[in-house]
Amino acid sequence: MSDAIQTLTMPKWGLSMKEGKVTGWLVDEGATVESGAELVDIETEKISSAAEAPAGGVLRRRVAAQGDVLPVSGLLGIIADPSVPDADIDAFVADFQANFAPPEDDDEDAGPATETIEIDGANVRYLVKGEGDGVPIILIHGFGGDLNNWLFNHDALAEARIVYALDLPGHGGSAKAVADGSVAALAGAVRKFMDALGIEQANLVGHSLGGAVALALALGHAGRAASLTLICSAGLGTEINSEYIQGFIGATRRKEIKPWLEQLFADPSLVSRQLVDDILKFKRLDGVEDALRTIADGFLADGTQSAVLADRLGDAGVPVLVVWGAEDRIIPVAHAQGLPGGVTVEIVAGSGHMVQMEAAGTVNGLIEGFLNR
Amino acid sequence: MARTITYQQAINEALDQEMTRDPSVIVMGEDVVGGQGAEGEMDAWGGVLGITKGLYEKHPNQIMDTPITESAFIGAAVGAATQGLRPVAELMFCDFLGVCFDQMYNQAAKFRYMFGGKAETPLVVRTMIGAGFRAAAQHSQSLYSVFTHVPGLKCVVPSSPYDVKGLLIASIRDNDPIIFFEHKMLYTMEGDVPEEPYVIPLGEAAITREGGDVTIVTLGRMVHLAGAAAVALAKEGIECEIVDLRTTSPLDEDTILESVENTGRVVVVDEANPRCSIATDISALIAQEAFGALKAPIRMVTAPHSPVPFSDALEDLYIPSAEQIAAAARDVAGYGE
């Protein structure tokens, strides 16, 4: 019977997540849902997002109620075909709950941990998930971010292939030296990362500055990119919220940085105290402020973007998907318009600059569809 | 990259990294090189509890033992700080600060002010606080309020391995005299600490737990007892917000008041004696600045007005407990309901 009955369980977003709180259902019992649809809002100590339908069908049971706190893998709901009798579903739920044991609180078994590789004498931190023979994905975060920016995307994309997420030089757990900090230098660092791990070719997925890095890599090193997914990407126009960049670099305290971080999301309530603390922990490391200033100087001049590659998109010779949050307050969504023919453009309503977090299910679906085209 | 180390290792790492970064950073104090149990310099004990162990081998020209004469070596450290060095003096137990009170509150604290802003005194005095170590009345006090009272001194009271490293590095790089109060019962506490040096700005409180019902303002080891109380209270439906002061001078008044404006109910928890203390200071601040937000009287949970007892049983009763904190929070949460 279990083939016909699909469980919706508490997802695990990141290594440290142990439990999540149900903050509200988005779908009524009895509704027909598609695979990947957002069904229920979940809040963790780090960030809020929605759990997605693992399969299409009818949401037959909302097992967890609003306000409930469930361990990772706990039962949120049941999706099944309308033909499955209620009694079977009740029996399934009873059986699941009777046998459910939360995952051991053991970091060794908590999934893959980040790894570090030394390239040219400098550490690069990365996280790899998934398996398969296909062309892997490399996820490249934006300015001031790190591999955790892909928290809601990494697992979903890794169901069909190997997916790497790395910390760019100057960011996350990677070394803080950034050479001249230019987009070209960052692209060179990603290429060396590919060389070091024996990745001949990859589908490059870049967010914000990471998009410009992916594009520069594709243009500068023919054959290394199989495709480009550019999310709220830098490098596609001159306008940028340079006040945000300078404000982010200069802020040293919680109160100073929170208003800037709120600009990243259409829904500013997503900026939790834990998110702010995590970013401050990064920004307070010796060398980070210098690295960020150097990198900012590498792609900004007089408050505008200095490395615009939009008219060279066609030269990359690979399929390009451009995704943008309609309410992006960092880089204007207008940069998604007027791109060369053949570029697929998707605008996601109700999301800001961190669209891959704010509308993770949608973005995951767009990337999946693009790669399987 | 973060990894798990102890509070004690985090202090050692901060000293090591700052001595490496800046040769003008020196460490001095009783037995900080040698000390009891050491067979020679390379087996140096590193202070009464081994906090500075290993620093002599790495930085032999930046660390020195001093005689058991607090008035002399703290005075020397104050003088050295005015002449271009950045001394980190270890004054074993804060209970002994009385021996060198003049050097701290009448000299170091006054130079910048009395020389028209031209003098800087980049001095850190590291010292141990706290009861629970079975060390009796003269080695167990928490005297941060005495020095918080004095303008010109900064007072730091770190509660975790992450905080102790970032706050010590911030203190060493700061150009004013700082007393750095380490709780001896936290030395073995483990936590995630980045390997790289980092700075936590002085004067920013941390919110270690969010909640909308009761604000618990606390510091040092009491942050963890408040945390245990908050976990118990959450099961009863009372959500506590914990404000860890981190520094008592400068004091992050904004974070305290913002939390109180949100909850309207406050418990102040302080391991020190209750009179003229951080607890009374915070209570007065809230009464003066956020009276309109209060829905219940402010409650203080502190040690009694008594020396720290040597009897184990009495010392355990002396230290504020998670149960006492929970009871106080329960009281204010239910007040007027």
Image (tube, coloured by chain):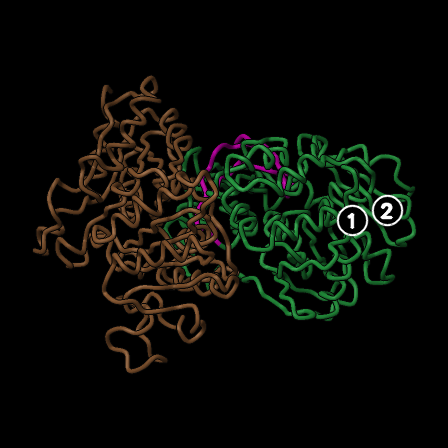
Chain colours: A green, B brown
Circle 2 sits in a helix, a strand or a loop, which is it? Answer: loop
Mark 1 belongs to which subunit? A
Q: Are marks 1 and 2 on the same chain?
A: yes
Residue at x 39%, y 44% (from the top left corner): B111
Number of disc labels: 2
Residue at x 35%, y 47% (from the top left corner): B108
Residue A37 inside the magenta-drawn segment: yes
Residue count near mark 2 (Cα–Cα under 10 Å), binned few <14, some 14–19, many ≥20: some
Percent position of residue A146, x then y: 62, 52
Quadrant in which residue B202 is drawn: top left
- Of labels 1 and 2, earlier in sequence is 1
Q: From this viewpoint, is residue B231 visible? A: no
Q: Is residue A50 above or below residue B317?
A: above
Residue at x 73%, y 60% (from the top left corner): A190
Disc 1 designates what residue?
A212
Foreground residue, B7 or A30?
A: B7
Residue A80 inside the magenta-drawn segment: no
Quadrant in which residue A343 is drawn: top right
Disc 2 designates what residue?
A309
Percent position of residue A69, x then y: 41, 41
- How many angstroms separate mark 1 from mark 2 (CA)? 8 Å
Residue count near mark 1 (Cα–Cα under 10 Å), binned few <14, some 14–19, many ≥20: many
- Bounds of the magenta segment: A16-44
Check contact, mark 1 vs mark 2: CB within 8 A: yes
Q: Amino acid at mark 1?
A: Ala
Foreground residue, B235 or A148?
A: A148
Q: Amino acid at mark 2?
A: Leu
